[in-house]
Structures are given as structure tokens and as C-alpha cells.
Amino acid sequence: MTGAQARAASAIESALAELGLAAESPQPGSYLVRLEGEHKLATMTWLIAGAHSLHVEAFFCRQPDENHAPFYRFLLERNGRMYGVHFAVDTRGDVYLVGRLPLSSVAPDEIDRVLGCGTLVVSDASEVGRVALPDVPRVEQLQLQLSELLYNMHNARSDDGT
């Protein structure tokens, strides 16, 4: 582990302790953080201090069964307004929140901000409700748009759902 990675790991550990978040560390500089949600049981998020950057990753949802165009359009539009993380898909089409931050920017406040932004999107994407986090601009408006999109996708079926 380099000096920059060790400093980043120390900042991550400090942030997690301040936030009271549980994390597993399978190897030095790698943390699997459990983010408790209001509606969803928990979101598991990776924080990995690499050679040059901090990698952040959390599962968002499985590939949508239908209404692909409006769903992906929403994700792409949202990517331009998110802080520290963005939506990405894997080879199966499952959606993740991923991000990279330079190791030099890793500090407890940045970890708090990135985890806070991710928690809003993940824990409230499929549930009704509003959560106001100060680190996300126009958070209530975003929540309403996301809830409406998912509700419309679910109720737009013209068949019996089979």
C-alpha cells in the first residue's frame, strides 16, 4: 500500500467511524460498507483505495424488463447532475452507481458526501417517500421525478404482466 493509499484508508476509516457505519475490510484499503435505508433494508457499497483513485460502487437495480428508453434516458439525464457517482451498466444490463475520486481528495467530509448522495438514490428509488439530504441539489424534486418514473413504468403494462 502506498502512502497515498494509506492516507485515503485512514480518511475512510475516520469517516466511517464518525458516521457510525459498519464496514468489512477484506484487504487493506478496501471497505464494504452497509448503508441502512428507510425503505430498503440495506445497500452494500464498496470503497476501494486504488493506486491513484478511490473507487465507489453500489448495486442499483436489475436490468429493466420493459420501458428501456425512458428508464435509460432518466439515468443519463441524472448522471449530469450527480456528485461523485454516476449510473453505469454491466454486461447483463444491471445498473450500478459507480464513481472515482482522486486519492488526494479523499477526506471524511468527501466520504460522507459521496455516501449520502448514493444513499438517497439507492434506498428511495423503488419506494414512496421523501428524504432531504443537503448534499443533493433539489433533492425533493429529484425524488418525486424518480418515484413517478418508476411508478409509471410499473403501471404502464397493457397486459396481465406475464
Image: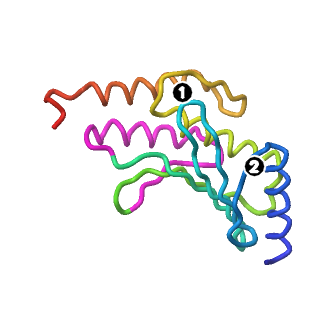
Please determine whether, in this image, residue 148 is positioned above or below residue 36: above
Residue 89 rendering spot, x and y as whole percentages: 42, 55
- Colouring of the image: rainbow
Mark 2 element type: helix
Considering every residue shown, the one lying at the far bottom of the view is 1
Q: Position of residue 134 (x, y in %)?
A: 72, 28
Determine the residue located farthest toward the left in the rendered image.
Answer: 159
The percent position of residue 90, horizontal first and vertical second, equals: 41, 60
Q: Which residue is mark 2?
A: 111
> Above or below — where is 46 with respect to 18?
below
Counting every numbered tag in the picture gives: 2
The image position of residue 13, as x and y in percent, is 81, 57
The local secondary structure at tag 1 comes to helix
Residue found 30% across the figure and 29% down from its top: 154
Judge whether residue 81 is colored magenta.
yes
Residue at point 50% right, 51% down? 59
Quadrant assignment for the C terminus: top left
| 27 left or right, relative to 37 | right
Which amino acid is tagged 1?
Leu
Nearer the observer, 146 or 27: 27
| Separation of residues labelled 2 and 1 (CA atoms) | 22 Å
Segment colored magenta:
64-90
Which residue is at a point 77% across and 47% down the rendered structure image?
110
User: Residue beneath label 1, please?
Assistant: 142
Answer with the quarter of the image where residue 140 lies. Answer: top right
What label does residue 60 carry, if any?
none
Q: Nearer the viewer, mark 2 or mark 1?
A: 2
Of callouts 2 and 1, the N-terminal one: 2
Would you call the spot at circle 1 few (<14 residues within 10 Å), some (14-19), or many (20 or more)? some
Give the vertical position of 152 relative to 118 (above or below).
Answer: above
Q: Residue drawn at (65%, 49%), measured in percent from left and top?
A: 34
In the rendered structure, which amino acid carries the disc numbered 2? Ile
